[in-house]
Amino acid sequence: MPNQLPAAVIFDMGGTLEDVITNDVTHLECAQRTLDFLAQQGVRLDMDAAGLLDIVLPRQKQYHAYSLDSCRELTPFEIYSDWRFKDIPMDRDLLRAIANELAFIWETTFYQRSLRPGTHEMLEELRRRGYRLGVISNTACDSQVFFTLLEYGLLRTFDVINLSSLVGWRKPHPIIFEITARSMGVPLDRCVYVGDTVTRDVIGSRRAGYHRCIRIDSRLTANSDAEASAGAAGGPTREDADFVVQSLLSIPAIMDSLGLLPA
């Protein structure tokens, strides 16, 4: 009798479903948009974009190190109040009200995003075969991933979208993988995860007990894996995914080979 249990393919967002660029130009643009937004809220800082970056970037690096070590993701308010804007005098009640909007500016400007070629076709093929589809993303913003998927015309494609900012735990902690699978009603050993990093995506999905993991390289892969491997939580690793692909369009055939759905 064929197996009637559901199966799922769950994706990382930045670097996997989308290409991400970050550089000095995007950093300055983010800082200027932040200053402009703050001015609209009645907060005028006596500095230019470069001056704001001089304050915010060292604190962001400290937060990044903390999150790598602990696998914790704080709320947007906590990130801005205790880390990014710790050295900027500002009314904390106002900051609480606008923190997610500040995080949204960061996620959409500090990082510039575009959908990978073939994403729509690949997801349509998986959906046609009967897989449940999900997203797990490490992000400091509560709304950016939903907004971006809506912009791509993909929001309704996914059964479950889980964010570290909402769960409170970041990949590679297994709990965010476990919560996502259970929310989809799919056993852990019938989930396949697709990501671009070893230290977050491959290790995290394996720790959670996912059936297989697939990896695709991105502009972020080498730096992200190097940072995590140097930190206390990651440790050096040569582990890699079960499958490494050059195109997302390879994924439906890989899923066919795994035999998770009835023939």
Image (cartoon, rainbow, N blue to C red):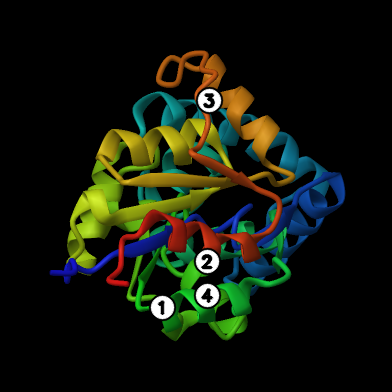
Closer to the eye: label 3 or 1: 1
Query: How far is disc 3 from disc 1 in space, using C-alphas?
Result: 35 Å
Numbered badge on residue 129: 1
Q: Please identify the quarter of the rendering in which residue 196 is found.
A: top right
- Mark 3 burial class by Cα count in 10 Å: few <14, some 14-19, many 20+: many
Closer to the eye: label 2 or 4: 2
- Mark 4 burial class by Cα count in 10 Å: few <14, some 14-19, many 20+: many
Left or right? Give the position of 36 relative to 120.
right
The picture places residue 249, in percent across and down from the top left corner, at 64, 66
Disc on the earlier residue, 3 or 1: 1
- Name the residue tied to disc 3: 228
| Residue type, label 3 | Ala
Q: What element carries label 2?
A: helix
Q: Give the vertical position of 208 relative to 20 (above or below).
A: above
The residue under the point 54% across, 63% down is 253
Work out which quarter of the rendered image holds the C terminus and state it: bottom left
Q: Give the vertical position of 258 relative to 199 (above or below).
A: below
- Name the residue tied to disc 4: 123
Numbered badge on residue 252: 2
